[in-house]
Amino acid sequence: MTSTIPDELRYSKEHEWVRLDGDTATIGITHFAQEQLGDVVFVELPEKGASVRQFSSFGVVESVKAASDVYAPLSGEVVERNVKVIESPELVNSAPYADGWLLKVRVADKGELNTLLSATDYRAHIGESGGSGGD
């Protein structure tokens, strides 16, 4: 069984993930979050150039069940938003860690990364044991 939580990413308790590449962070919602939401039908994201602040809402993901705010795991400036998920919101469900990412942010303070959860800590946070949880 493979875990639905990639080890190389960092996670927020609000179920967002971060992949850091230099000073740019790619941000999305976790497999667990998209599973809880159900079929995503609408995604609202900030424009390029907008500022996001750690743990503050930056957008909305709407599913057939509910609308949920999405929170920035790190502070910074939006350098890119994923137009593909705005046009095809189902990508959030089908590929949350790949084509379903939401934002790329130029990180203001890499030290904020230390406040996020490791994959192991995130698994514990959602109650998933080490290697289980795959479909």
Image (spheres, rainbow, N blue to C red):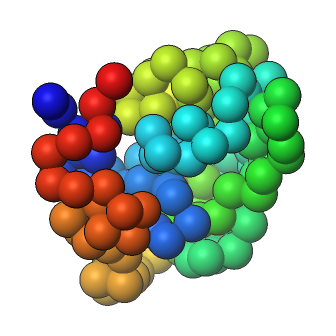
Who's the residue at 36% across and 75% down the image?
A: 116
| Residue 2 rendering spot, x and y as whole percentages | 17, 32
Residue at horizontal 56%, vertical 47%?
Answer: 33
Q: Considering only vertical position in the picture, is 74 above or below 49?
A: below
Residue 77 pos. (x, y %): 58, 62
- Asked whether residue 105 is in view, the answer is yes
Residue 35 in the image: above or below residue 105: above
Q: Quadrant of residue 80?
A: top right
How many numbered marks are there? 0
Along the horizontal axis of the image, is 12 left or right of 44?
Answer: left
Outermost residue toward the top? Answer: 88
Which of 119 and 56 lies nearest the eye of the viewer?
119
- The residue nearer to you, when weighing 46 against 134, is 134
54 or 80, nearer to the observer: 54
Q: Residue 72: x percent and y percent? A: 59, 65
Quadrant of image for the C terminus: top left
Q: 98 or 105, which lies in front?
A: 98
* Quarter holding residue 64: top right
Residue visible at 46% across and 68% down in the picture: 12
Quadrant occupied by the N terminus: top left
Horizontally, is 15 left or right of 130 in the view?
Answer: right
Residue 83 seen in the current view: no
Residue sitting at x 39%, y 70% = 125
